Image: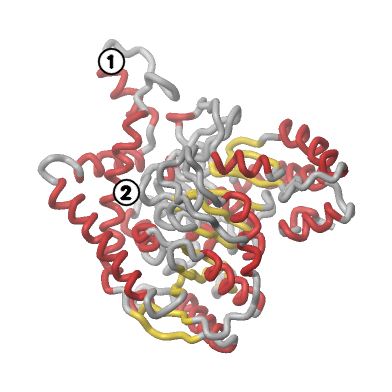
């Protein structure tokens, strides 16, 4: 039996029944990483010694009757999530030697739940990109076809789960960075409501948009992980002080009477033929289960991409200003002045895509451009939020494709317009602070995964999980 093919729920059941041990499970994943990582490139750092040390400790606690929700489940984190004592690089030369002295809240919660950190995952540098080709440590390959991208920015996380190199992973989603690679790699990716999961210890590039989310193989696994990481955190000023439910209680395949909205703006030109066909098939499935599907309108959709890139670039320019070669990270050598140190460090430490984003952001928030660009983008963001709020007065869930096209071939990262458009269906949920999930729905004519996106009301992840689980069980 290949233990790396087990879902979280299956692995927990077998560990509980003593059919397998935690040590066996962890070693199976370490072997899989050893065999595949040179080809896939999903991991930057592998925590082999820590894994082998933690396995026996957790097994002993479990044998003694301790309640450990994620007892020994091997997982991995995108390399922009802080891990105490473990290299955290954001896939950038700028942080190539940065070992944090504290833990992110999500890693702390997962550790207390008994999950075992396999390592840190490759990504687009500082989360800037949509193909995972912008990493200092090299690109990540799509496990379904190594000639194609896994999506970005959390391509390493999606590829690791799809290739059975991690039982689940966490990434960050600023414009679809969890959902888009999940769609490309045929796994489940959830972008939770902004504020549901602590962002403490996330090295964000766009703070008001980015949210940590899980990537799993099934919707049930997604609910299990969400239970472990959701909740208020006083260390995070953006954390919502609300009580979250048990998300596994929503794992029911009864969705009779659920109202599903299909935005007409999301099925217009530019959508791949097979993806549109899969969307129509999905609507038929939902209707056969008793859901009610109706067409809705989100008229501000066409402005979502430009508004996002203005806001995100502005926030990235501000956030990345801290990397100056003085306090931590990369420092240029042979500099004769402080000004030269700043210039050389940032020129050598950042990749091309990051530098372009910083320059754009600085331009958008400059004195002469602030009102024309940044302030206007904020107004558009509010209008997009109002569009969704109005739509959710009459419906429970919105259904869309996750991406307009399936995974494209490597080497197209120099086409910024194409990169932007790959997030056209996902970015609005970030601008409006909504929850959204991408679930697999078959393949196209090339055998590449197709993703289906469901968008929910703020803090209504339960309804989202119920709809996604019902669809998964009936397809």
- In the picture as drawn, the residue positioned furthest to the right comes out as 18
Q: Which mark is residue 338?
A: 1
Observer able to see residue 26: yes
Please state which of residues 278 and 25 is positioned toward the viewer in this rendering: 25
Label 1, secondary structure: give it: helix
x, y percent for residue 384: 29, 65
In the shown orientation, is residue 14 left or right of residue 230? right
Tell me the crowding category of disc 1: few under 14, some 14 to 19, or many 20 or more residues within 10 angstroms, Cα based. Answer: few
Label 2, secondary structure: give it: helix
In the shown orientation, is residue 310 left or right of residue 115? left
Q: Nearer the viewer, mark 2 or mark 1?
A: 2
Please state which of residues 173 and 127 is positioned toward the viewer in this rendering: 173
In the shown orientation, is residue 330 left or right of residue 320? right
x, y percent for residue 338: 28, 15
> What residue is shown at x 39% (from left), y 80% (from top)?
394
Tell me the crowding category of disc 2: few under 14, some 14 to 19, or many 20 or more residues within 10 angstroms, Cα based. Answer: many
> What residue is shown at x 49% (from left), y 60% (from top)?
179
Circle 2 residue: 312
Please state which of residues 374 and 363 is positioned toward the viewer in this rendering: 374
Asked if residue 81 is positioned above or below residue 176 in the image, the reply reads: above
> What residue is shown at x 32% (from left), y 48% (from top)?
312
Q: Which one is earlier in the sequence, the residue at label 2 or at label 1?
A: 2
Image quarter in which the N terminus is found: bottom right
Observer able to see residue 131: no
């Amino acid at each position: 039996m290949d233990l790396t093919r087990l879902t979280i729920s299956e692995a927990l059941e077998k560990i509980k029944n003593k059919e397998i041990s935690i040590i066996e499970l962890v070693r199976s994943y370490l072997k899989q990483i050893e065999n595949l990582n040179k080809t896939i490139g999903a991991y930057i750092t592998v925590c082999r010694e820590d894994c082998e040390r933690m396995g026996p400790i957790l097994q002993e606690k479990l044998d003694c009757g301790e309640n450990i929700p994620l007892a020994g489940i091997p997982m991995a984190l995108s390399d922009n999530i802080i891990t105490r004592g473990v290299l955290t690089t954001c896939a950038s030369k700028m942080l190539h030697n940065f070992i944090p002295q504290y833990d992110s809240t999500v890693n702390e919660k997962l550790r207390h739940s008994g999950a075992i950190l396999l390592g840190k995952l490759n990504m687009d540098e500082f989360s800037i990109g949509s193909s995972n080709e912008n990493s200092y440590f090299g690109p990540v390959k799509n496990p379904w076809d190594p000639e194609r991208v896994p999506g970005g920015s959390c391509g390493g996380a999606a590829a690791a789960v799809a290739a059975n190199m991690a039982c689940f992973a966490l990434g960050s989603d600023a414009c679809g960075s969890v959902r888009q690679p999940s769609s490309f790699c045929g796994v489940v990716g959830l972008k939770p409501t902004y504020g549901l999961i602590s962002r403490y210890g996330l090295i964000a590039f766009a703070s008001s948009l980015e949210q940590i989310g899980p990537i799993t193989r099934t919707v049930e696994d997604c609910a299990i992980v969400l239970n472990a990481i959701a909740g208020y955190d006083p260390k995070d000023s953006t954390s919502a002080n609300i009580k979250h439910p048990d998300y596994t209680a929503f794992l029911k395949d009864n969705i009779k009477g659920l109202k599903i909205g299909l935005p007409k703006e999301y099925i217009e030109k530019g959508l791949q033929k097979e993806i549109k066909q899969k969307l129509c098939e999905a609507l038929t499935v939902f209707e056969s289960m008793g859901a009610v599907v109706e067409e809705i309108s989100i008229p501000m959709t066409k402005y979502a991409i430009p508004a996002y890139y203005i806001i995100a670039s502005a926030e990235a320019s501000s956030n990345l200003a801290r990397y100056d070669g003085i306090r931590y990270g990369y420092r240029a050598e042979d500099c004769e002045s402080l000004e030269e140190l700043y210039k050389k460090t940032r020129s050598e430490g950042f990749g091309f895509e990051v530098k372009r984003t910083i320059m754009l952001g600085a331009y958008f928030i400059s004195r002469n451009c602030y009102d024309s660009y940044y302030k206007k983008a904020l107004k558009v963001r509010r209008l997009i939020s109002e569009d969704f709020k109005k739509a959710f007065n009459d419906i429970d869930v919105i259904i869309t494709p996750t991406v307009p096209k399936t995974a494209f071939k490597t080497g197209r990262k120099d086409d910024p317009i194409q990169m932007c458009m790959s997030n056209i269906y996902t970015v609005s949920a970030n601008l409006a602070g909504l929850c959204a999930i991408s679930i697999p729905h078959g393949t196209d004519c090339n055998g590449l995964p197709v993703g289906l996106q469901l968008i929910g009301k703020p803090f209504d992840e339960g309804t989202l999980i119920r709809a996604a689980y019902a669809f998964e069980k009936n397809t």
